Amino acid sequence: MVSSDPVYDEQVAAGRGNGRGRSGPRGVPQDQAAEEAVLGAILVEPGVYERLAGMLEPTDFMDPRHRAIFAAVLAVFERYEAIDQITVAAELSNQGRLQEAGGQAYLNELVYELPATVGAEHYARLVQRAATYRDMIRAAGEIGELAYQADPNVGESLTRAVELIYGVRGADRRQDFRVLEDLLSDVLGEEGDAEAGVDGPTRTGFTDLDKLLNEGMHGSDLVVLAARPSVGKSALALTVARNAAIGQTLPVAIFSLEMSAEQVAGRLVSAESRVEQSRLRLGRHTEEQGGRISQAIGLLSRAEIYIDDTAGQSLAEIRAKSRNLHTRLQERAHRQGEHRAGLGLIIVDHIQLVHGWARAQSDTNRVSEISLISRTLKEIARELQVPILALSQLSRAVERRHPPVPQLSDLRESGSIEQDADVVVFIYREDMYEREDYQDDLVSDASRMGDHEIAQLLVAKHRHGAVGRIDVRFVSTIAKFEDFYAQPEPGVDEF
């Protein structure tokens, strides 16, 4: 139902007339009959409100009388009193809003003429849907006003527009209980899923690490990968992205706030072809290396890796872009009849470069901002049911420790990263430090293996399992991590 006038008739707001058959503001979605049916059902039958709990708020009702009545219902419920016409009328009277709600006569009308308790949930969804569309119209109006203001900082305006769009609540806001019986089949997973990568975890590609993480990174998990600069965070993240996209054919989204998309692509080609990036940039590679490069490009071109290299992105942008890409991939999978849909992994490189608030407020308390960022990334992971691999810097405190092995307290700028993360993984490379100063028993075999260095992935937190240490091989010339026990690849040619 849509209205014929931009302003509610004062007689309706005062309760003179029942309002049925009338319409709200022009072009604004409203379902007057559904609003009346929901309130009538709540007032007539005990327990109806409990069935609808979480679905509606007072502002979801277009008619101001209905807003007042539903607010009174909430107040009565919070006092653990029975919800009926008498208690709601008394609450409205105590608030001084009885006449605003149409008076006792209108409550009588809702109770005796309009109850439909059986379909209460259906009518509540109709009210909810109309409210969502009104929110969309409101957001569109504010976005239009931003455009008319023509602020010199167009990036700031776009960020605010994205926040407004994301602020529109979905049509189904209630997360209801799920029966244990329906969940038990998911505990062990579907037979064959671990092999086929269907609805299973996203594997890192490192055998021992996947075993420790219960076969990989799971949907809704926030996995934090932390290390000091130049230790290999981005290299490890890109290796995981490659393994997920090629090994499991999963779509991967990378928010690269530090490197350009071209640099990310160059690193992937270098690691896949085992040819140094310097040779790629200068074109100084042999014919045999050229063949490997062509094969690498052919393989990577089939991988669904989406790279967004926008510098200084805000949380709102990351959230909106992730949702948009995830939804588009789900729609495509549905059209093609595929079982697994949506993103398989989101990578954020790195947390300290993300803006939690508007960019103009970048000098705001950084600890609070990092707390907001880590909490929101966890919310995105839960919302989309997609694991997020978030890279993080470590404080300098690790370098003053002997030996300089990372600890959870080294997470830079905020302890909330440790709190929000499901998994925290540190990279430790002894070759980054003077061996004679930092010899320790962490490395079982610290000898050099040509260009291959031993490194450790230290799982310092694991919400769903054990912690531990994983030995891996780091090939410094091509910035690639490999399984430690995998057969070493042939050496890289020298200039």
Image: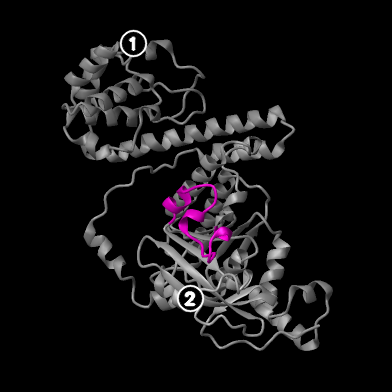
Residue 456: horizontal and vertical position, in percent?
52, 72
Helix, strand or loop at label 2? It is loop
Above or below for 300 versus 94: below
| Residue 163 x %, y % | 56, 39
Q: Which mark is residue 16?
A: 1
Classify 90 as above or below 343. above
What sort of colour scheme is used for the picture? Answer: one colour
- Could you tell me how many numbered marks the image carries? 2
Q: Quadrant of residue 218?
A: bottom left
Q: Earlier in the sequence, mark 1 or mark 2?
A: 1
Q: Is residue 302 visible?
A: no
The answer to whether 477 is drawn above or below residue 355 in the figure is below
Report whether 146 appears left or right of 59.
right
Q: Which residues are magenta?
A: 398-421
In the rendered view of the protein, which quadrant contains the C terminus?
bottom right
The amino acid type, in three-letter code, at marker 1 is Arg
Residue type, mark 2 in image: Asp
> Residue at point 55% right, 36% down?
164
Q: Please say if the residues under marks 1 and 2 sit with CB atoms less than 8 Å apart.
A: no
Q: Residues within 10 Å of mark 2 (few under 14, many from 20)?
A: few
Residue 482 appearing in the image: yes
Q: Which residue is at the front of the view, 388 or 385?
A: 388
As drawn, is 463 to the left or to the right of 349?
A: left
Q: Does dot 1 land on a helix, a strand or a loop?
A: loop
Image quadrant in which you'd find residue 200 = bottom left
> Mark 2 — residue?
441
Q: Residues within 10 Å of mark 1 (few under 14, many from 20)?
A: some
The one of 74 and 130 positioned closer to us in this rendering = 74
Q: Is residue 417 magenta?
A: yes
